[in-house]
Amino acid sequence: MPARIENETPLEKLARIREKTKLRARRYYGNHRQEVLDKRKDDWKKLKEECARQALANRNNLQPNEMFEYAPEAYIPPVVEMRNNPPTNPPTNATRSSKRIAALEPFQYVFQESLPKGRPKMTTTKKTKCKDKGKYTMEYIIEALKLLPEGSEGTIKTNIDDISTITKMTSPLLDCDWEKGLSKPLLIIDKLETAQKLNSNEKYSTNAKIKYLNLIMKIIDKIIPELIPIKDKYIHQSEILKQRSINDKEEYLVNVYRFDILKKKILEKFKKHSKEFLLTSLYEQITVRDNFSQLKIINSMNDIVKDKKTNYLILPNNQSPFVKVFIQKYKTDKKYDDLEFTCDKILTDLLIEYINKNQESINRMGGYLFGKSKLSGYIGIMLKKIGIDVGMAINYFRHSVALTLDENKKHNEQSVVNLARDMGHSIMTHLRYTSHNLVSE
């Protein structure tokens, strides 16, 4: 927390307050992440519904492009039979040029039985004139991405939004033909580097540029293979941006305890047979994300259902005297294979003792070791009780494990790659984890 400085100037005071506010915001988001995301989702849904209602009520007073400005996702029924005539002229303070919604007199409307299928075509006020329109237009790229088997609904929607953004950032290179435009990687890269956000002098973030380059490389691999020979130029720029991203994050570095010190603090506070110490021991050997929630206890590997929906804890049996953990549902499970871990004897004994002691509550929770609720909030509170409040919960464990191994030099390059895979993230992410400050006390 920024310390108060005696006789500080107004600018110094403002900088201290801003830093304090940022830290509080990171802490709150770390402890209430799911609540924040759910609220954003609900608010966005309500906003879209309200926009749809307003656009429908004003459809006779607005042009099509204005309607979609208010409700881009809404379906506007084009055939409406009205009872009672709506006002012919909107109030003078609600003109089209001001983009305000006109206040209407109450009226009733009845939809005819048959309506045209599909959504009305969105029109824009500004169209690009393509003299030499190629095969790989933006519309073609979007439709091709939708047909890729590995894309989820959320990923497809994000990709569509990103394609539109890339087209605007690189205009006019990709306006008419993506194959022709992407064949000029130096021009594309320069456009991405210098592009500014709409109605702002602010440039796009480094991470946003990395995301757009990754999408461009995906399009080259899956849709325009003719451009694979020049893909290396995009890969090279992506690596440069990743290094820049690491440097940009240096201002957010925090002090992280060595894992042995962290484990000792938790042991002293909560004792050996506590849930807190068991979770710490699990993350010491299996450094995944929030994947121990919904960890179902089974007796054999044969009981695993490989549906990417449930993670499993396999009790000792004839095949193995140790507990095993099978993780198939995690953040990057589409990119990496299923994860399988074997616990050592000490952790196996802790797990068996905990299961036997809490068998009744585990049965009530459907056979899940810690129930079905996320553990991020629980671990965040646990860390606060031992004096650690830096806006991280499970990620604090992950950073500590990576940093401790890096300091001990108990690994070579291959073991770093293996650890990054077991943690379910890339090498570049792993390097960011090891950029924090490791402390012993």
Image: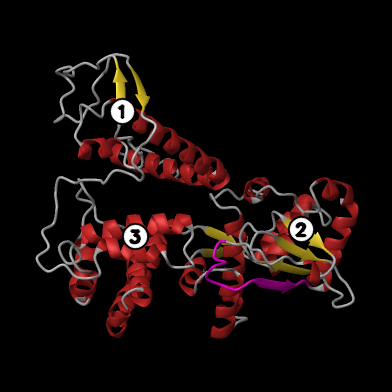
* Sequence-first tag of 2 and 1: 1
Residue at image position (80%, 71%) is 302
Q: Position of residue 213 (x, y in %)?
A: 32, 68
Q: Amino acid at mark 2?
A: Lys
Residue designated by label 2? 296
For marks 3 and 1, give the one nearer the viewer.
Answer: 1
Residue designated by label 3? 208
Q: Position of residue 330 (x, y in %)?
A: 60, 62
* Sequence-first tag of 3 and 2: 3
Residue at image position (56%, 52%) is 392
Q: Outermost residue, front direction?
A: 113
Q: Is residue 244 visible?
A: no
Contact between marks 3 and 1 (CB within 8 A): the answer is no
For marks 3 and 2, give the one nearer the viewer.
Answer: 2
Q: Quadrant of residue 71?
A: top left
Q: Secondary structure at mark 1?
A: strand
| Residue range (magenta) | 331-343
Residue designated by label 1? 80
Distance of label 2 from label 1 (alpha carbons): 54 Å
Asked whether, in this view, residue 122 is left or right of residue 285, the answer is: left
Q: Secondary structure at mark 2?
A: strand
* Main secondary structure found in the magenta portion: loop
